[in-house]
Image (spheres, rainbow, N blue to C red):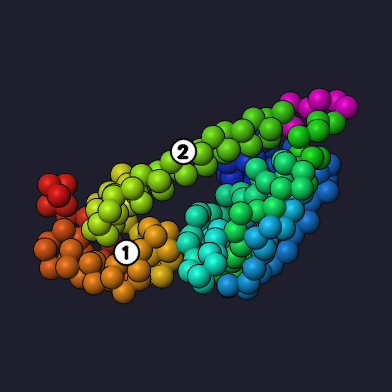
Amino acid sequence: MEKQALQDTTLFRGISPEDAETLLSCLDVRTKKYEKDEVILRAGEPVRELGLILSGSVNVVASFYRGSESIFGHFGRGEIFAENYAAVPGRGVIGDVVAAEDSEIMFIDVNRLLKTCENGCEFHQRLIRNLLTISAQKNLSLSTRMMHIAPKSIRERLLSYLSEQAMEKGSRRFRIPFDRQQLASYLGVDRSAMSHELSKMKRDGLINYHKSDFILNESAKRN
């Protein structure tokens, strides 16, 4: 992502390319590239920096004692992660942050971000306001996931998630950011059982799909 394109991200929204370049110098950012499935942050690792995804995407994966895993979040190009943990000194991240595909990450020290320069420049204040907005949006996303995993049946969880995705995309045709294993992990269900249920839902005329592309049929609203 070029510096001029930073203004298209939520974090740098409303900040001109010139002011963004000044901020990057002030914040002393660093960037690093990761291959798919490479761990960016390990669970329990204290962090001081938030990550801004310049390209690719990442998953936040929690592992449990019995070896099972659950995806607690997925973040794509232009989004940030680990900002809440970086704001609490010594607090380790709850799960591994893993590259879902080849990715490039810009790391920004949160302490430097929250501490404005002596001039109190307006664009730095805007950056802080943007960060607060992102934090609020993520709290809403967490509440949404809790809604998806509240139903007992796999079908109800799938319909909850797919309906929310259709509403978010503004179309009954949409692409989800997960593969099958990731979707099962996100919804807290067994992959084989979920794949079987997806096939049944397709036979019942509720959905159509090919890999990560889905169509939510009108009949799904009546279930």
Residue farthest along the front direction in this orientation: 65
**Given the image, on which type of amino acid does mark 1 rest?**
Asp
**Residue 223 spot, x, y in % from top left:** 14, 49
**Given the image, on which type of amino acid does mark 2 rest?**
Leu
Q: Which residues are magenta?
A: 118-124
Q: Cα distance, mark 1 to mark 2?
A: 24 Å
Q: Secondary structure at mark 1?
A: strand
Q: Is residue 172 or residue 179 the one in the foreground?
A: 179
**Residue 187 shown left or right of residue 73 in the figure:** left
**Residue 64 shown left or right of residue 216 in the figure:** right
Q: Is residue 174 above or below residue 202?
A: above
Residue farthest along the right direction in this orientation: 118
Q: Secondary structure at mark 2?
A: helix
**Residue 109 spot, x, y in % from top left:** 78, 46
Kindly identify which numbered label has been placed on residue 213: 1
Residue positioned 24% across, 72% down in the render: 196
**Residue 30 shown left or right of residue 8 in the figure:** right
For the N terminus, give its image quadrant. Answer: bottom right
